[in-house]
Image (cartoon, helix red, strand yellow):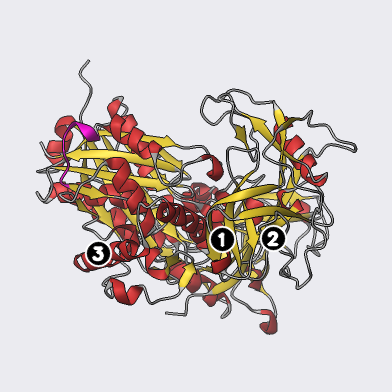
Amino acid sequence: MPEVLSAPLVVEFPFTRSLGPVQSAFLTGLRERTLLGVRASDGRILMPPVEYDPVTAEELRDLVEVAGTGTVTTWAWNPHPRPGQPLTAPFAWVLVRLDGADTALLHALDARGPEEVSSGTRVRVRWAAERRGAITDIVCFERLDEGGRPDGHADSQGKKSRQSDNRPERPRATTPHTGRFDGDPVTGIVTAARLDYTYTSGRAQSRFLTALTGRRIIGERCPDCRKTYVPPRGACPTCGVATDEQVEVGPRGTVTTYCVVNVKARNLDIEVPYVYAHIALDGADLGLHARIGGIPYDQVRMGLRVEAVWVDDDRLAPTLASVDHFRPTGEPDADYDTYKELL
Amino acid sequence: MMPREVAIVAFAQAPTVRRSDQLSEVELLMPVLHDVLGQVGLRAGEIGFTCSGSSDYLAGRAFSFTMALDGVGAWPPISESHVEMDGAWALYEAWVALLTGQADTALVYAYGKSSPGSVRDVLTRQLDPYYVAPLWPDSVSLAALQAQALIDAGHTDERELAGIAARSRTAAEANPSAQLVGSAPPDVLLAEEYVVQPLRRHDCPPVGDGAAAVVLAAGDTALDLCPRPAWIHGIDHRVEAHSLGVRDLTDSPSTRLAAEHAGLFEAPVDTAELHAPFTSQEVVLRRALGLDEEVAVNPSGGALAANPVMAAGLIRLGEAAAAVHRGESQRAVAHATSGPCLQQNLVAVLEAR
């Protein structure tokens, strides 16, 4: 059997979410270098803040400002940062309880090595120079020295942490806050999400796709109901058994149904209108979709006999695009009874 | 009305492997479905309700669960459902369907094909999209934060964690479906480098592709299909706050509550199948479930020996049931987890009668 085919597959999308009033105030606050928590039903200050109480599910709205300094509650040294993570050089993941808050925020801590980090380490926020209202407005945390100042060691880009907020740190104090700031509030987030895969097509689809490079269309037959599926996916959906008997089908077939396409598709260099049809290849028990050419669009009809027109040799590839289109064979139309089960 | 009794009457799984490039998801799953249905002599069309668990994100294939249904044989149309969760939660849905009399038998299956992608990164997309997912904290890093909290609290140390790894993978030598079998002694393991400190490679689950299926049956039907059914005394599942910093990562109150509702604490168990993908999570679960040294924990090797994401929890229920079927267990507890740092937990108590 042919080798199983594989190809890179990227799933990428801008993950776009609107915000509730508490999240909006928090992220707007980050833009303004202000850290807002929310008071929970039991009086605790939740940081980062949430819209609903994690215990009682009550709506929470009492915002309070907390300090930009805090204490590490747990940590994990990450020697090999992965794409998208806050720092590119080795860093510590930390949960930080900011002064004035009762719960901890997840972020990165810039440090030279794990020996510089422990639970209890005092840290402060390192703000991004340009902020847009996102959790990444905090670049990371950095350690405070004994006197409550940053230790000033170089960040991951090799620069001193000069963009840090150098205002004197406030003690553990919380100040009520309206959540309103100058400028427009942040009302949504867009997080770029990208996942990289290597897609493999499995045995049945690989056999089908590889055969196309030799101008052959291979279906697979169910050992139970004897139906032949094109394209094959490895299983008979009716019987739930493997379809491992290969059957060459076509290249001729019958149009079972069709539509006239009047909208030009992006990236598709085909003049409209054209006909897209369901074609029952001779020997197949499942219709294949393809474009019909070589005949005016308004003369295509159910029962029309057609055959595959392949691309030139140098464009043959393990893809259905190796069949450029189907064209009429000139045979008499097929009788309705011969294809009615395939509609 | 007397509540119905429901049992797990059959369990099958595919050997978990690092890569299954030769197989599409349906090709991976189909032998498992045939195995489990063959054990009870039923065809898909004779099953009252079918429910599956999987996630399209693992392999990046949209609607892969509908393709997988081809392997069931769903024509004429069957009564069917799917959860984008571990198959243990599909089993829960099927159990409820049987309890309420909607069906007398159910087929539950799950599969996970992690090899096409990077599961550490894929799992970041299940996190809070506002405050957490933009930082891309991978699954090992989050588990490491929990492990450090446990160490700081004095609940465990790195040596004990290495012992859990060695014990699990040594136990897996008797499990033909396990992926990672056998282990160096803890002293050797502790000489390895950290993946994310304090977790080393041995503390983490292997990445693999796998599938599993069970058949459930109610009342007399269960007795007709299986000489020694694993009766479900109770199942419950509970979730904790989604914000990691709100939770006490050293404890699992959701597991304890689910166990209480499932009736775990009414009588001792002899066997526990815990879905603890990381060694440190077994420490949390043992404490939450109150398991003592008398209980055989993960005789299958557990998720440290094979962790096909979305199937590993269902496999815990299947392994516990199979121990009852074989007469090796009188009363077993099975656990499944979902989300970061044991966020959501399902507990089932299975019994011989």
- Tell me which numbered mark, 3 or 1, is placed earlier along the sequence: 1
Image coordinates for residue A94, horizontal then vertical, percent: 58, 55
Badge 3 and badge 2 in a common chain: no
Picture layout, residue A68 above or below residue B159: above
* Residue at which label 3 appears: B167
- In the displayed orientation, state which residue is furthest to the right: A183
Amino acid of disc 2: Arg
Image coordinates for residue B254, horizontal then vertical, percent: 40, 37
Other-residue count near label 2 (Cα within 10 Å), few / some / many at <14 / 14–19 / ≥20: many
Q: Is B221 colored magenta in this rendering?
A: no
Which residues, given as a range, are shown in magenta?
B264-270
- Image mark for residue B121: 1
**Disc 2 on helix, strand or loop?**
strand
Amino acid of disc 3: Arg
B2, A247: nearer the viewer:
B2
Picture layout, residue B323 above or below residue A249: above
**Disc 3 on helix, strand or loop?**
helix
B10, A170: nearer the viewer:
A170
Q: Is residue B25 left or right of residue A108?
A: left
* Residue at which label 2 appears: A291
| Quarter-of-image position of residue B180 | bottom left
CA separation, marks 3 and 2? 60 Å
